[in-house]
Image: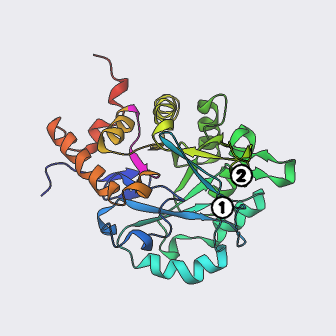
Amino acid sequence: MPKVDMTVDLKGLKLRNPLLTASGTYGFGEEYAAFVPLEQLGGITVKGITPERRLGNPAPRLRETPAGLLNAVGLQNPGLRAFKEEYLPRLRRMDTAVIVNISGFSPEDFKLMAQELTSGLGIAALEVNISCPNVAHGGIFFGTDPASAEEVLAIVRQNTDLPVIAKLSPNVTDIKVMAEAVVRGGADAISLINTLIGMSIDLDTQRPFLGNKTGGLSGPAVRPIAVRMVYEVYTVVDVPIIGMGGIMCWQDAVEFILAGASAISVGTANFSNPKAPIEILYGLERYAEKNGCRSVRDLVGRAHKKD
């Protein structure tokens, strides 16, 4: 038997260990199967799915930055129908939890996605991406308005039998207010952070480098912000947190867990080291054992404890 119990239960989402992969960085799992035994992961979060097929933003869509990566892919995906017919059958054969990230541009989009993606399809949970603009209400971003975020989570919660994870945007004044809003809406867990809005200027053309002008910044540069937000959210909600944002090694993962994350998700690191999730998992287990933990859960939120 393992010396440390690595299992976690995210309010109904049971995982063999706390190591997940972040949406948008791991495709549909198949792309990494040659590098990582997927059955050793706690789960994978698939590329964001929208009701209709999307081609995404114009190129260029990626730009490396010091200690990070700007991306403006624009939710390129095959759409709900193709995902269910072509990708889900293959995902069901993978021996790991499959979390589906869903995105939409109106409350009705989220309702449709929740109704169509059910537990009977072999899905473990839905991760609700509220970083998209609500086109029906003047383009306000769901993830920056507490009322809109609560509304979306309530709609998803009412229309699915799966655990619901709210993925929060860091582009807000007070992340605690957003966390409380999605929990009121019915979120079973919270994942944070999504990317920060950034920009890069091309010195030759003297214009924004990305075709979309702005993009989402991820990677080590955002980690201190992400750790701070996990730490803050842990103090105001009573649901599990999935920490993400610049996790490149096991030390980074431990930091998030000590701040209050019950699980962690690896994103940008996958691009530079496809084996990063497994290496991080092994390091995390060794750290827990070295610190006398019977369970990895014993580490959660220790940074909050008084001497």
Distance from the alpha carbon under mark 2 to that under mark 1: 10 Å
**Nearest the eye: 265 or 162:** 265
- The residue pinned by badge 2 equals 132
- The disc placed on residue 75 is 1
Residue found 32% across the figure and 29% down from its top: 302
Q: Secondary structure at mark 1?
A: loop
Q: For the residue carrying disc 2, how many other residues have a C-alpha within 10 Å: few (<14), some (14-19), or many (20+)? A: some
Q: Position of residue 146 (x, y in %)?
A: 71, 38
**Amino acid marked by disc 2:** Cys
Q: For the residue carrying disc 1, how many other residues have a C-alpha within 10 Å: few (<14), some (14-19), or many (20+)? A: many
Mark 2 and mark 1 residues within 8 Å of each other at the beta carbon: yes
Residue found 17% across the figure and 35% down from its top: 291
**Amino acid marked by disc 1:** Leu
Foreground mark, 2 or 1, reads 1
Q: Position of residue 48 (x, y in %)?
A: 60, 62
Residue 56, picture quadrant: bottom right
- The disc placed on residue 250 is none
First-in-chain label (2 vs 1): 1
